[in-house]
Amino acid sequence: MVAANVQDRDGAKRSPLWTRLDHPSVTKIWADQGFADRLVDWTATILGRELEIVRKPPDQRDFQVQPKRWAVERTFSRMNAHRRLARDHETSPPRSETMIRWAMIGIMVRRLARGRPVTRQGPWPLSCVPSP
């Protein structure tokens, strides 16, 4: 995570570097099309890791779910359920990163504590609703 005044491509080396240091078993990293230039070579030569750029198909004209990117978007959605992350209140990137880690720990603890598949509360299917 970098400050808002830093271009993504300029601050992009930090994330793979910390991934390499914190999680040495990770060998493949996925990135968006914006990181396709020098970052791929840098990651391979300096970090010894493979950086794969996730691209949309060249013939795609409308919205289409891309599996790897969908996992990231779903994670952002789950984090936004935490009030502290719903707005940009933090002024420093390290503090914001801490709040994100705190939210993800809460998500993982709830998953582990549940111990069973997710069941959603919601309206009954139309065939089960009693008629008036």
Image: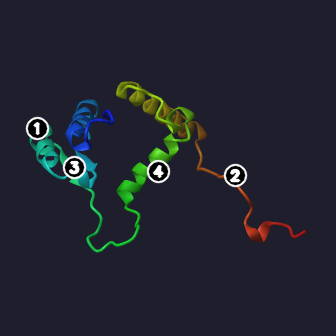
Q: Secondary structure at mark 1?
A: helix
Q: Secondary structure at mark 4?
A: helix
Q: CA separation, marks 2 and 3?
A: 40 Å
Q: CA separation, marks 4 and 1?
A: 31 Å
Q: Secondary structure at mark 2?
A: loop
Disc 4 target residue: 74
Per the rendering, the mark at residue 46 is 1
Dot 4 alpha-carbon crowd within 10 angstroms: few under 14, some 14 to 19, many 20 or more: few
Q: CA separation, marks 4 and 2?
A: 19 Å
Q: CA separation, marks 3 and 1?
A: 16 Å
Report which quarter residue 60 is drawn in. Answer: bottom left
Question: In the image, what residue type sits under mark 1?
Answer: Ile
Disc 2 target residue: 121
Specify whether 131 is left or right of 20.
right
- Residue placed furthest toward the left: 45
Query: Which of 114 and 3 lies nearest the eye of the viewer?
Result: 3
Disc 3 target residue: 35
Specify whether 128 is left or right of 2.
right
Q: Against 24, is 57 above or below?
A: below
Question: Are dots 4 and 3 in contact, CB under 8 Å?
Answer: no
